[in-house]
Image (tube, rainbow, N blue to C red):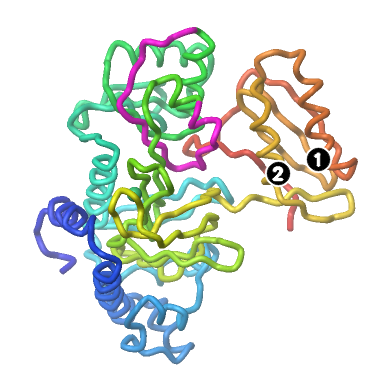
Amino acid sequence: MLGAKVNHDDWFYSRLKRTEYLSSSEIEEMQNEQLRRMIKHCYDAVPFYRKSFGEHSIRPHQVRCREDLERLPVITREDVVENHRYFISKKIPKDGIMTRYTGGTTGKPMKMMITGRERMIDNARITKQCAMAGMSMQDGQFHVGPNTGNMPWRYDRKNNAVLFSPLHFDDRNIGTFTGLLKSYGFRFMRGFPSLIYLLADHCRENGISDIRLDAVITKSEQLLPHWRKTIEDAFGCRVFDQYAQVEMVASAMECGSHSGMHVEPSFGIIETDKHNELIATSLVNYAMPLLRYRTGDIGKVAKNRCSCGRCSGRLVEFQGRKCDMIITKNGKPVNFSPVMSRIQRHQNIRECRFVQEDKGSLRVDLVIRKHESLKSIKRSLNSLFDGEIELYFNVVSSIQREGKGKSRFIISKIQS
Ligand SMILES: [Zn+2]
C-alpha cells in the first residue's frame, strides 16, 4: 500500500467528501475498520509498538474498536522524542522520507517523519476543510504565518497565495500588508489568529473599512473570543477555526453553524482524559504512527448532531495548549487561564506576553494603545494574585516571536 503509485490527494479527498455526512453508526464502523488496519500496521512494522504490545500482553486482534483503545498505554511527547527512531515504520522507503517539525510552543520542536503519502493526505484534508468555509484553494488566498525566509511577504505563484511572514509583523509592515490585502483583492484568508487579529486591529485603528473577505480560517493557535470578533468586524465575514497538528493524530474544522469544530473521522480518533486533555490516535499517519498520543491540547468532544447535518463529534470549549502554571512565592502552582480572561477585558492591550523567571514574580510585556491606561491594567491583574505574585510591567513596541512565529502567552523559565 505504501509504495503504490496513486494520486493520494484525489483518493483521500474523495473519501473525505464521500464520508462527510455519514451517520454516527457509519462513522463508527469506518473508524473501527481503519483502526484495525492501523493497529496491525503498528504491530507488524513499527518497533516501538511491537515491543510495547509485548510488554502489555496485547495482541493486535484484541484492539478492534474505539473502546479497545483503552488497552493501550497513553504515550507522551517525551516518549516519542526518546524513542524517535523506533516510531518510524520499517516499511517506509528510505528515499521517500521527509521531516517536519512541531511548532515548539512548549519545549523543543519535535521531529516527525512523513512520506509523500502523508503529505498528500494532509493536503487533501486542508482542501476539504477550506471547502467547509466556502473556500477553494484555486481562488487565491492570503496565508498569514508561513515561513517566507527573510522577506516580510511574497507571492506564491504555485498556490496563488500571498504569504505574510509571522516574524515581520511590526507597525511598518502591517501597513504594507493591509495595502496588499487591497491590491490583491483575494476573498479568503487563513493563518495564525494572533496575527490576523493584528491586521484587523490595524484596519479598525486606521478607519480602513473597504477590505471585505468571504471567510477567514484560523489555525495553529487558540482563537481568543475578542480576536474572533475584531476579525469578523474588520473584514465583514465569519471566522472558521481549525485544529490540526504536525503529528497528524487528529483534525477538526468549524462548520457554518459555528458551534464547535467537527472532528474529521477518517483522520484520527480523539479521547479526553479527566482533565479534558485530548488524547488522539492517528488513522492516517503510516510513516510514524502515534497511538493514544497526549496532545497537550485542552477541549471536549460534543457528540450530539450538529444543525449543519454532520454527525461527526465536535470539539468544543477548545483552549489550545495546556497552560503552563505560574508559581507563587510559596511554590504553589496557579492556573494561567484566569489571567487570559482578565486580559481580554482590556481593549487597550494589543499584545501581551508573561515571562516567569523566578517563583513569585512575573514580567508582563505589553503592547498597549494608550500609555495612560496602564494603571487600570496593573490594578486589574494585581487583584488576581493578592500579593502572592509580584507583577513587573514592561511596555514594549512589539513582541518578538519565536520558532515558527506562533504566539506564546506565557514563558516559564522555572525548572520543575
Ligand atoms: Zn456542523
Q: Secondary structure at mark 1?
A: helix
Q: Which residue is mark 1?
A: 384
Question: Would residue 326 appear left or right of 410 to someone viewing this image?
Answer: right
Three-letter code for the amino acid on which mark 2 is drawn: Pro
* Among the 4 quarters of the image, the one containing residue 144: top left
**152 or 64: which is nearer to us?**
64
Q: How many other residues sit within 10 Å of disc 1, few (<14), some (14-19) or many (≥20)?
A: few
Q: For residue 338, which numbered disc appears in the image? A: 2
Q: Position of residue 135 (x, y in %)?
A: 24, 34
Q: Position of residue 190 (x, y in %)?
A: 36, 33
Screen quadrant of the N terminus = bottom left
The residue most toward the top is 207
Is the residue 105 above or below the residue 11 in the image? above
Q: Which residues are magenta?
A: 207-229
Is the residue 259 above or below the residue 393 in the image? below
Q: Disc 2 to disc 1, how far (Cα)?
A: 8 Å
| Residue at the spot 51% in from the left edge and 37% down from the top edge | 406
**276 or 109: which is nearer to us?**
276
